[in-house]
Amino acid sequence: MYEVSVEGHFAAAHNLRGYQGNCEHLHGHNWRVKATVAADCLDPIGMAVDFRVLKRGLGAILEELDHKYLNKDVAAFRDGASNPTTENLAREIFARLGAPGALPDGVRPLRVTVWESPGCSASYTEE
């Protein structure tokens, strides 16, 4: 199996419902995201997936999150559907990468890691 990773960034605000501490208040982060995908074989020129294709796919997802209030502007977190924690953001980005048409045939998401600040990250994988 081959693994290919790209990174992206977005800025957004959130507050953690049910949290006892400063993070229950509205605050923002400059989030860093690393998406790793897997492929079992290479294309005829020896690539699992073109970095540009993967960056474009991740970029489209992050653009939908950029400069948003995650609790209100993102359906996955609106109305208490899910708390916009770093863990849940990783899962949401993973799910969007795995949606039909988001990645080329034969390429699947393997892991998404999200940093809310330097040294503080959470990852989501289904494997």
Image (tube, rainbow, N blue to C red):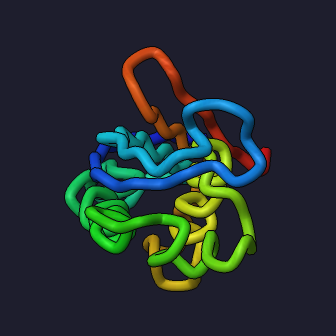
- Give the total number of marks visible in the rendering: 0
Evaluate whether residue 111 shows in this view.
Answer: no
Q: Give residue 23's position: percent from left, percent from top.
A: 57, 38
The residue lying at 51 percent from left, 50 percent from top is 37
Q: Give residue 21's position: percent from left, percent from top.
A: 65, 31
The residue lying at 55 percent from left, 51 percent from top is 15
Residue reaching furthest to the left: 52
The residue lying at 29 percent from left, 47 percent from top is 8
**Is residue 99 shown left or right of residue 44?**
right
Q: Nearer the viewer, residue 54 or 13?
A: 13
Name the quarter where the C terminus is drawn: top right
Evaluate whether residue 115 shows in this view.
Answer: yes
The residue lying at 70 percent from left, 54 percent from top is 17
Placement of 3 over or under 77, stated as above or below: above
**Is residue 1 shown left or right of residue 42?**
right
Q: Nearer the viewer, residue 60 or 78?
A: 78
Query: Residue 7 appears in which quarter of the rendering?
Result: top left
Q: Give residue 75's position: percent from left, percent from top.
A: 57, 81
Query: Residue 61 appears in which quarter of the rendering?
Result: bottom left
Q: Give residue 122's position: percent from left, percent from top.
A: 61, 33
Name the quarter where the N terminus is drawn: top right
